[in-house]
Amino acid sequence: MHPAIAPIALEMQALLAEKILPFWLERSIDEEYGGYLTCVDENGAVDARADKMIVTQTRMLWGFSSLRAFAPDAVCAEKMAAAAHQGYAFLMKYFWDREHGGFCWMTARDGRPLDGGKLMYAQSFGIYALCAYYLAYGDPEALAYAEKTFGLIQVNAADTANGGYLENLEADWSPAGPGWCAGDRKSLDIHMHLMEAFTLLYQATGKELHRRKLGEVIDLILRHMVDGAGYGRNQFDLRFNALPAINIRRTWNAERESNETIAAPTDTTSYGHNVELSWLLHLAYDTMGAPGDAPILKKLLDHSLRHGYDYEFGGVYRDGVGENPALVTDKEWWQNFESLVGYLNGYLRYGGEKYLAAFAGTWEFIKKYFLIEGLGESRQLLRRDGTPVVSAIGNPWKGVYHTGRALSECVRRIRGSSCGA
């Protein structure tokens, strides 16, 4: 094991335990209404007026469940448990649709319904958070609702004609309209997160049905959504014909604060997604007990190193097109944090100094430019050279999930390796 790995693990563990977890514990708990407040500026000030979105409500619940093992002491661990319990109560009281079932998209701060849409993005993170809560705290009701959500997806969203799942649905599970509402589109993004959710669901239940559906999503992604050269395409029609990517209602691409529109052909790709997909696929295979070293998983990393990695400044670019140079050289927090896990996973799985160098270079870029000194959490978006574009720390899409998960996954991998960190 390379001697540089162990010190990085110590840095990451300290950042997670001493900065990131306390940051969100001190700011995100809505003491008045319950649930989580996630709109935080670069100085750490919270905007308590903001509405609540399913994405961050579930991701914060996931964080206060899955990351409890990284609490620096028993007091912090108990605070995390209390934060998780109240977040779970708010989620099930206000986001669960008692008429149609499933998780709605958005409420006001006090829980009043604002958008009852049944997006697969929402359902996947509902399952993910409930399983994490169950695994951390043993609440059987949470697991029952995770399984119920899984069942509702199979009944209401499974595309039995073409495979995969309809992604954008209304409150009663009817498909949304075409175009911007995207009822006529499928994406790698949502199917990847369904894979992520089904992986944790199978870990929680051990049921063959959940394993089988996980395998089906993996097969669909690799068969229809990933090019053999090692990159994923973003958007497809219902029959998995690749389409030029457009901004879609209720997505991060449409709502990111930089507010730009990127015009690109059908093989536009996200470098961070590709690297994230590589390690999530490995995790899914490991959870299933299946062989997990398909050549495409290494190709996803290698494509990103050819076109998506910045060898001058470090870090990962946002978007590109096939086997061409990067199209958008800005750097986003989630892509760079997820790439830490992907490159480290590649190094531990395959060897090769190129993966280690990309891991270490991305970590140095993150420390120097993304992390806000004193607060320890990450800005959202930077120029290639690290100049801030969006410095706010949290919004309806950004909480503890990408930063906390990346650091925890890296530390767990290094601890489990031969370096003994």
Image (cartoon, rainbow, N blue to C red):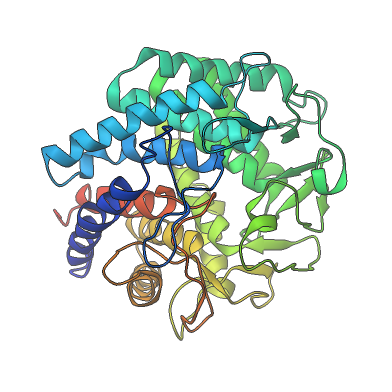
Quarter of image, res 328: bottom right
Q: Is residue 241 above or below residue 352?
A: above
Q: Quadrant of residue 135?
A: top left
Where does residue 217 sit, x and y in percent of width and height? 62, 34
Q: Nearer the viewer, residue 73 or 358?
A: 73
**Image quarter in which the N terminus is found:** bottom left
Q: Quadrant of the C terminus?
A: bottom left
Residue 291 in view: no
| Residue, far right | 178
Q: Identify the residue shown where x is 80% and y is 25%.
A: 174
Q: Position of residue 351 (x, y in %)?
A: 34, 62
Whether residue 69 is visible: yes
Total numbered labels placed on residues in the image? 0
* Front position in the image: 113 or 5: 113
Task: Give the side of residue 219 with respect to residue 393, left or right.
Answer: right
Q: Nearer the viewer, residue 146 or 53?
A: 53
Left or right of residue 160, residue 414 in this image: left
Q: Position of residue 154 (x, y in %)?
A: 67, 20
Left or right: residue 163 versus residue 212 is: right
Taking the image as shown, residue 284 lies to the left or right of residue 243, namely left
* Vertical side of 10 occupied by 248: above or below: above
Tell which of 11 and 22 is nearer to you.
Answer: 22
Residue at 65% across, 23% down: 153
85 lies above or below 247:
above
